[in-house]
Amino acid sequence: MPEIYDGHSTNSFRGAGGGERTKVAVASRDKDVDPVGACVGMKGMRVQSIIRELRGEKIDIIPYSEETVAFAQKALSPAKVTRVQITDPENKKLEVIVEDSQLSLAIGKKGQNVRLASKLIGWDIDIKSEEEKRQEIEEQMTALTAPVTPLTSLAGVGAKTIEKIEAAGITSVEKLAGMTPEQLMEIPGIGEKMVDKIYQAVNRFYEGGTEAAAATGEAAASTETPAQESEAAIVEAAETSEATEAGGSP
């Protein structure tokens, strides 16, 4: 295209090719010249001749923009974008929301459309459908309103074990209950026997009712008898032995 080659009517050009499809962004130095129209040509003759030279490779010609959000919307054509949000300016990351029917078109065959768009604008693009975004928001709201029961409410699980579990980022009974045995055994100092004890404690917690178990835990913490202290010492000793078997330090 002469306008791009000599720079007379186009002063900004970016391209991203993938073998089957290419995206090109153009801008004109002359406000009276349509850069996209100049490249496409009358009835698409200019771009069609190039497509033939490239043996059928598709070419998307879009207007270049200094504004990231607008540029991202254009770069994802032919898909229609609902909205674009900059999620991480420092690392250049965008979240793009499209209608459910537009998701496959926005992503493209084998992810080609979003990959070329990302390369063209120089930002990482995370595409989600309206339904996926709605579910994500619902999960976040559920997590905010979900009950949180401290691990100290679990009878039969000593302080040392709780410290190890909390160090791994598990701070509630609800979150602990959703973990698999394999995930628990990845925690330093937690072995197979201790995993069984933890699951037994979690099962007792839910069988006895959340509120009752929590009340029992609080009462035990505030009114510990000598016998209970002895029982706790036995649990701690068992945990220490288990940690040693698992390769952790007592």
Image (cartoon, rainbow, N blue to C red):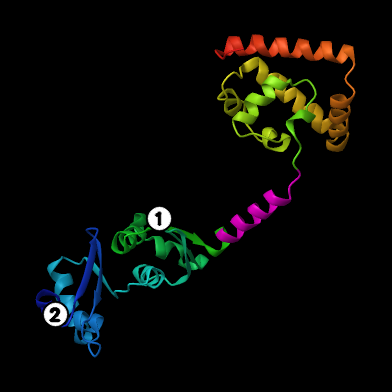
Is residue 135 inside the magenta stretch?
yes
Q: Which mark's residue is nearer the viewer, 2 or 1?
A: 1
Looking at the figure, which quarter contains the N terminus?
A: bottom left
Residue in the foreground of this view, choosing between 235 and 131: 235
| Residue 3: mark in rendering | 2
**Residue 174: x percent and y percent?**
72, 37
- For marks 2 and 1, the one nearer the N-term is 2
Q: Is residue 218 above or below residue 67?
A: above
Quarter of the image holding residue 234?
top right
- Determine whether label 2 and label 1 are within 8 Å by CB: no
Identify the residue at horizontal 43%, vertical 62% (top origin): 104
Cα distance in 3D space between marks 2 and 1? 35 Å
Q: Report the side of 122 relative to 98 (left or right).
A: left
Quarter of the image holding residue 30?
bottom left
What range of the chain is rendered magenta? Answer: 133-147
What amino acid type is highlighted by mark number 1?
A: Glu
Q: Is residue 190 above or below residue 58?
A: above
**Residue 21: x percent and y percent?**
26, 63
Q: Is residue 92 above or below residue 66?
A: above
